[in-house]
Amino acid sequence: MVLIELVFAIALGVFVVLLLVNSMQREQQQQRLRNAFYQQLGAGNGYISLIQLVAAAKVDPELARQFLEHQAQVLTAIPEVDADGDTFYRFPKLRPSDAAR
């Protein structure tokens, strides 16, 4: 009986550690996405594509897609397609009068 409790306690400990590690990795990915998003947005003069975000943040494309679509919805970005058929999101530019408000 003691052996079963010990195995259970060890398994529970491993599970908790894995949850913590997973949570920290997700937070690090979100931070990389945020940093890359604003960097690419500035460098691209308000335009950003999914592949640019994936490459800059070095995260899974699906995670980057979800992040980019959420940002596009929140910040009212407009999707545009270039001559090559690539989709870019055009985000509103910050104007000096907007910053003063």
Image (cartoon, rainbow, N blue to C red):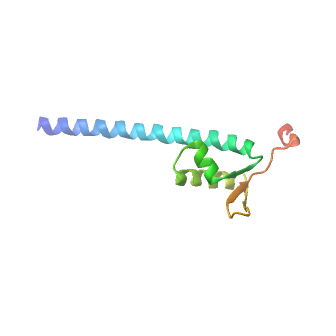
Residue 23 placement: quadrant = top left
**33 or 16: nearer the eye?**
33
For the view shown, which residue lies furthest in the left direction?
A: 1
**Residue 3 position within the rendered picture, expressed as x and y whole percent measured from the top left:** 13, 36
User: Where the C terminus falls, by quadrant?
Assistant: top right
**Residue 32 position within the rendered picture, expressed as x and y whole percent measured from the top left:** 58, 39
Q: Is residue 47 left or right of residue 13?
A: right
**Residue 26 position within the rendered picture, expressed as x and y whole percent measured from the top left:** 49, 42
Count of numbered labels shown in the rendering? 0
> Could you tell me which residue is drawn at 72 percent across and 45 percent down?
41
Up the image or down, 29 lies above or below 67; here it is above
Residue 13 placement: quadrant = top left
Up the image or down, 89 lies above or below 29; here it is below
**Residue 97 position within the rendered picture, expressed as x and y whole percent measured from the top left:** 88, 41
> Could you tell me which residue is drawn at 11 percent across and 38 percent down?
1
> Could you tell me which residue is drawn at 19 percent across and 38 percent down?
7
> Could you tell me which residue is drawn at 74 percent across and 46 percent down?
44
For the view shown, which residue lies furthest in the front direction?
A: 84
**14 or 42: nearer the eye?**
42
